[in-house]
Image (spheres, rainbow, N blue to C red):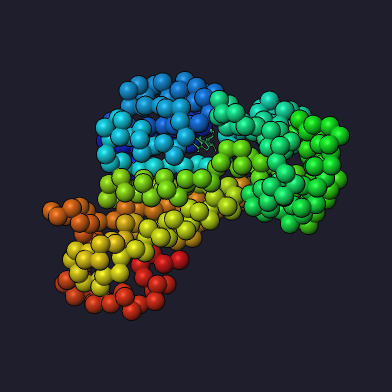
């Protein structure tokens, strides 16, 4: 999806165990480079070992992807050829009961991807007011029974502090969460807590915009999202970047100052096989070239000037008829 090429500079903002990073480095052989970051120091160590054979083609950082622009600045890297975000948890995190992400295994209610941060899921569960808990579960878990579940949590914690994954799963199940859904009742509550503990949605849109600005023409940003809240942010941000310019299409250089920055490579999300039904892949590709004035020139301007695509006043055109609309 990143259309890697030799010599390119790629960024994997969610390195995990390094599987995608390895594939990128192979596709960009022999001299393509990769900056990989992960907020989980233990996972990063696994990736570091895996990527050792690639030597100095790889640079790794223990960091949140929100910090990528400053990391790139510190490395003196102005433009990139691609960014991949494979959001969510790695199997290393999900399968380790000590991390507290799975309600199927007994473990502490931790849920921090970065264990150097302070607040755990147990802290939130035992500290937030009824109203705050209900709002968190409704907002990040999209759970219709949020108020009922929050009430059950507050009642239980008055008797005994809630510390473990299975304790919480039982409270949610007895409060009747996610009754109509095919998923386990605790799925949405665990998702909500995980998003809150790790502030997973904060700054995602800003990072995508920053990455697109740094992309070389033809470079791509691809995001794999596993829940609809993240996917909504990605969709909205990509669409906004793809539909900025309001100039007539025959102008060789954007005059409105809002050039379309990208085209949607995936006007509709790509959904992998049924077993991974929640995953949605979206990607955009940077358009244009920096002209002599620094303005972004339209890739289709030459065709329009030669009369191939005709004059379209996009100020009057409905937005849905514009390039990349979906
Ligand atoms: C689904 S896994 C990535 C798997 C990886 N693509 C691979 O091939 O092994 C997601 C990873 O992203 C990390 N992560 C999630 N949100 C992050 C963020 N805001 N900043 C940095 N890393 C993040 C998690 O710690 C986890 O290791």
Residue 42 in the image: above or below residue 262:
above
Q: Is residue 312 left or right of residue 171?
A: left
* Rendered residue at 78%/57% (across/down): 180
The mark total stands at 0
Q: Quadrant of the C terminus?
A: bottom left
Query: Where residue 272 appears, x then y in whole percent?
Result: 56, 50
Residue 82 appears in the picture as rendered: yes
Residue at (29% x, 56% y) in the render: 287
Give the answer, above or below, for where 25 lies relative to 257: above
Q: Could you tell whether 92 is left or right of 69 in the image?
A: right
Q: Between residues 50 and 232, which one lies in front from this camera angle?
A: 232
State the image quarter where residue 121 is shown: top right
**How far across and down, in percent of the image, does residue 10 sit?**
35, 37
> Is residue 22 visible to us here?
no
Where residue 101 sits in the image (x, y, percent)?
67, 34
Work out whether 181 lies above or below 157: below
Residue at x 54% of width, y 50% of height: 230
Q: Is residue 111 left or right of residue 312?
A: right
Furthest residue in direction left, as rendered: 292
Q: Residue at x 36, y 45 (%)?
A: 211
Residue 148 at what x, y percent from top left? Answer: 80, 52
Q: Using the image as rendered, state which of residue 103 and residue 307 is in the foreground.
A: 103
């Amino acid at each position: 999806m990143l259309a890697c090429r030799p010599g390119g500079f790629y960024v994997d903002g969610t390195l995990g165990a390094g599987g995608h990073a390895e594939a990128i480095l192979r596709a960009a052989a022999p001299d393509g480079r990769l900056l990989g970051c992960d907020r989980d120091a233990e996972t990063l160590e696994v990736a570091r070992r895996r990527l050792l054979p690639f030597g100095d083609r790889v640079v790794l950082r223990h960091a949140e992807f929100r910090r990528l622009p400053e990391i790139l600045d510190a490395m003196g890297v102005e433009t990139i050829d691609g960014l991949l975000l494979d959001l969510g948890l790695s199997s290393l995190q999900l399968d380790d009961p000590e991390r507290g992400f799975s309600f199927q295994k007994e473990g502490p209610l931790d849920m921090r991807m970065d264990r150097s941060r302070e607040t755990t899921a147990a802290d939130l569960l035992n500290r937030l007011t009824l109203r705050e808990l209900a709002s968190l579960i409704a907002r990040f878990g999209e759970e219709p029974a949020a108020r009922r579940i929050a009430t059950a949590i507050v009642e239980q914690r008055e008797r005994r502090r809630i510390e473990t994954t299975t304790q919480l799963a039982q409270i949610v199940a007895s409060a009747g969460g996610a009754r109509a859904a095919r998923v386990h009742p605790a799925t949405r509550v665990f998702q909500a807590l995980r998003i809150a503990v790790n502030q997973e949605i904060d700054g995602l849109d800003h990072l995508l915009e920053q990455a697109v600005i740094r992309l070389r023409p033809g470079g791509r940003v691809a995001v794999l999202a596993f829940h609809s809240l993240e996917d909504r942010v990605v969709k909205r941000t990509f669409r906004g970047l793809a539909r900025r310019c309001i100039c007539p299409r025959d102008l060789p250089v954007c005059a409105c100052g809002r050039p379309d920055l990208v085209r949607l490579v995936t006007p509709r999300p790509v959904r992998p096989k049924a077993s991974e039904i929640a995953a949605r892949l979206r990607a955009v590709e940077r358009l244009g070239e920096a002209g002599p004035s620094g303005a972004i020139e339209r890739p289709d301007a030459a065709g329009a000037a030669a009369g191939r695509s005709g004059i379209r006043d996009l100020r009057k055109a409905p937005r849905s008829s514009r390039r990349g609309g979906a």
